[in-house]
Amino acid sequence: MTERSVAEVLKRLGFGYDFLGEHPMRARAFSNAARTLKKLPDVATAFAAGELDALPGIGPGVLDVVARVVRGEAVPALDDVEARIPPGLFDIAQLKGLGPKKVRTLHDDLGVSTVAELEYAVNENRLLALSGFGPKTQEGVAAALAALRARAGRYRLDQGLAAAEREAERLRALPFVHRVAVAGDVRRGLEIVEDVVLVVHLDPDGEPALAAALGGARGEADGLYHVVYAAELPVRVVTCPWEDLFGVVLLRATGSPGHVAALEARAADAGAIFGPVGLYRGSERVPCPDEGDVYAALGLHPTAPERREEEVPLVALGQSRPRLLRRRDLRGALHNHTTASDGIHGLGVMRDAAKALGLGWLGISEHSQSAAYAGGLDAAALGRQIEEIARLNAAAPDGCALLTGVESDILRDGELDYPAAVLAQLDVVVASVHTRFRQTPDEMTVRMVNAASQPYADVIGHPTGRLLLGRAASPYDVEALLDACAASGCAVELNANPQRLDLDARHLAMAKERGVKVSIAADAHSAPALAHLDFGVTVARRAGLLPEDVLNCLELAELRAWLAARKARARGHAGA
DNA sequence: GCCGTTTTCGGCCCGACTGTTTTCAGTCG
């Protein structure tokens, strides 16, 4: 039912060849290609545009696989590999700490071919006897299995949003459907969702036909029918039989329960009833074709979907309310990568893509020298990029301005990865942790506070290091980091990659309280990935951020002034 | 399989970490 993505197919080929031990270098080639294409949000579009062959590590063999996957055809090489490897082993290979070699041992020496069998083997301590395995390995596998169970049925926002849009399109194509809207946790922009909720206005007798068209199960709750079916995610379609009820149904299907309860209480205070099938004053139903009609009838400003949480108060008409950040407030974005480190597009392509998104400036921050695996730049390579950026800026003075920078690894004690003289040449320094995630919380707190106090650190990148449904946030004292940022003037990043969304909304609100500026970073490793900024705006809105809280909203000259002030402070620091 | 101031063969990101070993393989970032 769910077709595999191009990157997944390539990854399976890579693992398969590695597991079979026949073509180790071919395996690496496919694994590398999978990693490269993962940096593109939409491989099919890039393939259709003929943009893939230019990418490093993408040759005729990989392109052939991509073409087949995009066209929905079978991939003979994958069929061959999958015919020779029990399917469960591909799942086991996803577990942290288990690579092709260890999976091979598990299979050959223990007869394990499924996740369930692996769990059973772990419970019986049977991994201990395997060569290359020991108590720590078994503990690690047990933890990875627990993490796998914990994320079952949970999806990232980008996955939920993509599925919601696909399913909404599908519903709109049905002749008896008049209007479709995305609701639920996806609409409120939760970083992790469990299902997709859609609201449809359809013919009064259209609901059985809807269930038939979707192949779903019918149900009924609070006087409304819904249809439940499985797509990439579980989908629940709430049906709205009357046009002037749509606002009510959409509002209630969007939630949160706490927000809906607050609206119900507000209605009750005004002697009205806000229920599942309408807003009633006495026996009269108030027509509410849109959500705004509900809020207006209750004497309220509409609450943005991202702010509809229990702890966010309703705002009465006549009360002033701050205007939340919008996408079009963004003038630029920091922290992006090019082919100079581990990005897949060059400076010119990145700049043009940023301009096409309406951005007037774009910060380039490649990996630093310690990050050899990501093609980190030494001081000389940084110097060459600074010159190239100067040339590009001079050649197109009216285009999107490129800012020089680096994403410096934060070393074990919080120091940056270059001497001050090198950092001083750069427009902006983003400081991020990429190694030694397993320091104790106290050590990590000291490390992060030190990093935020480094004179040349301008932004702390993806501050907790979490990977959603992958790696937990580093369990250190984020408030101590924010205090240090408030003291030093260092900004914090909201990494907008949907796998990170780091900091989260709760911590961003704490940053705002302290007056710490937020940098919404695409952390783009390809030109199309700049679009991830949209997710950043969603999270920023959930945190209640305003344009004035966000560095991206500065005009180029204002940003340069902010950076220059930090540079002057750093020089003073060095002179002291 | 991909790639090329190493260019049609012969290499292939590389250092750190970890847990396992008894000198290092496997995995990760």
Image (cartoon, coloured by chain):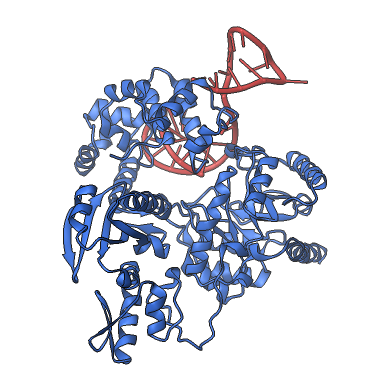
Q: Residue at x 60, y 37 (%)?
A: A344
In the image, is A187 to the left or to the right of A107? Answer: right
Q: Quadrant of the C terminus of chain A?
A: bottom right
Q: Is residue A260 above or below residue A5?
A: below
**Chain that appears blue:** A
Q: Is residue A543 above or below residue A194?
A: below
> In this rendering, does residue A252 appear at all?
no
Give the image location of residue A388, x and y in percent: 78, 41
Residue nearest the observer in this picture, B16 or A488: A488
**Chain that appears red:** B
Give the image location of residue A235, x and y in percent: 28, 54
Q: Is residue A501 above or below residue A9?
A: below
Q: Residue at x 20, y 51 (%)?
A: A216
Residue nearest the observer in this picture, A225 or A184: A225
Q: Quadrant of the N terminus of chain A?
A: top left
Give the image location of residue A110, x and y in percent: 22, 30
Marker count (numbered): 0
Give the image location of residue A297, x and y in percent: 38, 84
Residue nearest the observer in this picture, A521 or A234: A234
Q: Residue at x 20, y 52 (%)?
A: A209
In the image, is A174 to the left or to the right of A360? Answer: left
